[in-house]
Image: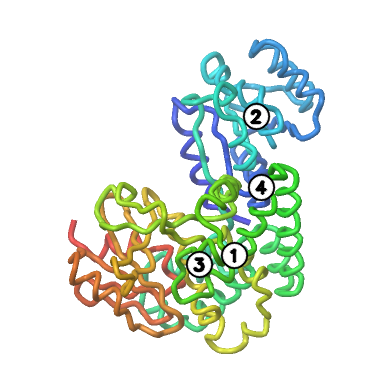
Amino acid sequence: MHRLALSALSGWKSRPSRKPLIISGARQVGKTWLMREFGRLRYKSVAYIWFEKNSRMRELFSGDMDVGRILAGLELEAGCRISPGETLIAFDEIQDCPNALASLKYFNERAPEHDILAAGSMLGLSLHPGESFPVGKVEFLNLYPLCFSEFLTAIGEEELCALVKRLDWGLVRVFRDKLAHCLKMYFYVGGMPEAVREFSSGRDFTIARKVQNDILNSYQQDFSKHIPISHLQKVRQLWASIPAQLARENKKFIYKEAQKNATASTFEISLEWLSSCGLIHKIPRVSKPAPPIMAYANTGAFKLFLCDVGLLSAMSALDARVILEGDALFKEFKGALTEQYVCQEAKLLENSETAYWANDGATAEVDFVLQIGSRIIPVEAKAATNLKAKSLSVYREKFSPEAEVRTSLADYKKTGRLFDIPLYAFGELAGVVAEGLPI
C-alpha cells in the first residue's frame, strides 16, 4: 500500500543537513513497514535493528558512545555492510533501549553522513525524557492511520483518489455515489493498516472487524504493560467512555460520564497517558479564533476523539449492515463518526492546528476551528446532506471570517465566503480554500 509519509521521508533524505528522524505514532499504524519500504525504495540496503527483548543490542549501547564501535556492532547484527548514502539504518522499538535513543545525538554530531530512521510508540518514547532524550539532535514524523485518500488507493480506487485531488467538481459530482459508498466503507474499516490490508483482499467486513478487535485488545495489554497499577483502572475507564461521549449532541468531554463524581484531577494523568500513546486527539475549545489559535485554548474544555474512525466503529459495535442502509452510517451516534473522520483528516493538514469554538452560554458551537498557516477557518461537519448550520451563522456574525467551510455529502459549492466541501474531499480543504480565495 502507498503511504503519503513516504513523500515526507523523501523530503528528509534530500536535505543535506538532515538529522536522525524518529517516526512516532500509536502502535500498529505502520511504522515498521514505512521504514522498511522507504529503505527498499531509496537505498541499496537496510540495516534493520529490532530492540525489543534484544539483549545483544542493549549490551552494545551500554558502553561508551563510540560511533565507530557501534556501527561495527550494527553491521554484525544486521548482517550487512553500512555505507553512508547507500544504507538506511532503521532502529525499531527504540524506546526499549534508552541508550540507543541517546546515541542519536552522537550520530548527529559525529557521523551525520549516516541516514537513520527510528521508530517507537509515542508512549514508550515519552517515558524517556531528560538526559536520555537527544533534544535538538533529531527530527520527528508523526504517523497516523491511513487517511481516506490512502484508503482509496489501498482498495484499488486510485482513479477515484486522483479525481478528487484534481478538484474536478463536475466529474466528482458524476461519481458522488461511488465516493460516498467508499467513504462509508472507510468509516467502518478505518485506516489501521492491517485492517485495510485484510479488507482490501476480499472486501470482507467481518475480517476487518476481527483485526480491529485484536488491535483494541493489544492496546489493553499495552495499558497493563506500561501504566502504573495506580492509574490503570482510570485509563481504561477514560478510554472506554469516549464512544459514549461522542454519541452525545454536545461532544464536550464530561469527566462524570467516565466515572461518577469525577473531576479533572481524577483523570488528569490518565488523559496524559492516552494522549502520549497517540490513541486520542484532544481538541480544545478556543474563546477567540485568532492566530496563534492555541494561545486562546481553554484547557478545561475539550473534545476527545480516537486515533481512528474504524476503531470507534469497533468500540461502538457498529453493525456492518448499516453500510447498505442509505446514509444511515453518517447519522449514527448523532454524527459522531462524521466528526471523528473530519478530526482525523484535519490532523493531516500541513502547518495546521485544530480546535473548536463555543460561545459563553454554550448556545452555539462550531465543530472545528482550523488554523492553516495564518488563516483561521471554521468548519461545520454535517451528517448526510443536512446543511443547517445555525452555529456557523452565529460565528459568522461575531467574527466575520474570510472563509468558512461546511462539509457534508452535498456537492461542492461556493457561496461568497462559504465553501461547501463534500466529506470525501475534505482532505483537500487547504487547496480548495486557497484556490477559491484571493492571495
Residue 302 placed where, x, y %?
43, 59
Mark 3: few, some, or many residues within 10 Å (few <14, many ≥20)?
A: many
Chain-order first, disc 1 or disc 3 = 1
- The kind of residue on which mark 4 rests is His
Say above or below: 371 vs 339.
above
Q: Residue 1 or 194: which is nearer the viewer?
A: 194
Residue with the mark numbered 1: 260
Residue highlighted by disc 2: 89
* Image x and y of residue 98, in percent: 66, 26
Judged from the image, the secondary structure of the residue bearing numbered disc 4 is helix
Report the mark closest to the observer, 1 or 4.
1
Give the residue number, with chain letter if any, for mark 4: 231
Q: How many labels does the image show?
A: 4
Q: Distance between the residues labelled 4 and 3?
A: 29 Å
What is the x, y in percent for residue 361? Answer: 30, 70
* Secondary structure found at label 3: helix
- Residue 47 lies left or right of residue 302; in this view the side is right
Q: How far apart are marks 1 and 3 (CA)?
A: 29 Å
The answer to whether residue 419 is left or right of residue 409 is left
Q: Name the residue under label 3.
A: 341
Of badges 3 and 2, the one in the foreground is 3
Q: What residue type is labelled 1?
A: Lys
On screen, residue 256 versus residue 61, left or right, reads left
Front position among marks 4 and 3: 4
First along the sequence among labels 3 and 2: 2
**First in sequence: mark 4 vs mark 2:** 2
